[in-house]
Amino acid sequence: MNLRLIKSSEPDVNITPLIDVVFLLLIFFMVSTTFERESEIEVTLPEAAIDAPVEEEFVIEVTINAQGTYFVNGQRVINTQTTTLKQAMLKVAEGRQDPPIIVSADANTTHQAVVRVMDAARQLGFVHLSFATTQTQETQ
């Protein structure tokens, strides 16, 4: 009869697979994260002396490119009629009363295209309009 005490060995935990999974997750999140918001719409903004940012949690951004095509929050409007533009702005507003509107018009777009956005906003009762510009580099 064997009466010796059998020493049970401590189970060792191998954390190498855990570290591998953590590194793979880290790489996945680094690759899938967007660090900079880039616009796919080519717009050359006009210049102004002061560029004041709008600090609102919800804004409607209406972009007009050089050809006069409208984009409401990045979605292309199918034509340039005021009624279509109003419908697109209402859809984005989602029932909000008087959201701030930022008009980003290309420097080479027609004056009529900008006035059409202002008119559509007025007809909807949206009165908080601002225009996106780039700040000039003044040398004295």
Image (tube, rainbow, N blue to C red):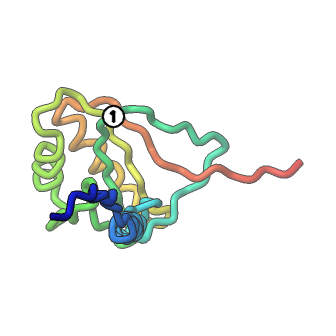
Q: Residue at x 17, y 46 (%)?
A: 92
The one of 47 and 38 positioned closer to us in this rendering = 38
The one of 66 and 1 positioned closer to us in this rendering = 1
Considering only vertical position in the picture, is 92 above or below 123?
below
Residue 2, quarter of the rendered image: bottom left
Q: Residues within 10 Å of mark 1 (few under 14, many from 20)?
A: few
Query: Where's residue 64, x and y in %?
Result: 35, 61
Left or right: where 139 falls relative to 67: right
The residue under label 1 is 57
Left or right: where 86 falls relative to 138: left
Residue 128, quarter of the rendered image: top left
Query: Where's residue 135, x and y in %?
Result: 64, 49
Left or right: where 139 falls relative to 72: right
The one of 37 and 35 positioned closer to us in this rendering = 35
Q: Secondary structure at mark 1?
A: loop
The one of 100 and 48 positioned closer to us in this rendering = 100
Q: Residue at x 45, y 44 (%)?
A: 131
Considering only vertical position in the picture, is 49 above or below 97?
below
Q: Residue at x 21, y 44 (%)?
A: 120
Residue 41, quarter of the rendered image: bottom left
Q: Which residue type carries mark 1?
A: Glu
Q: Residue furthest top?
A: 97
Q: Residue at x 42, y 39 (%)?
A: 130
Query: Where's residue 125, x and y in %?
Result: 19, 30
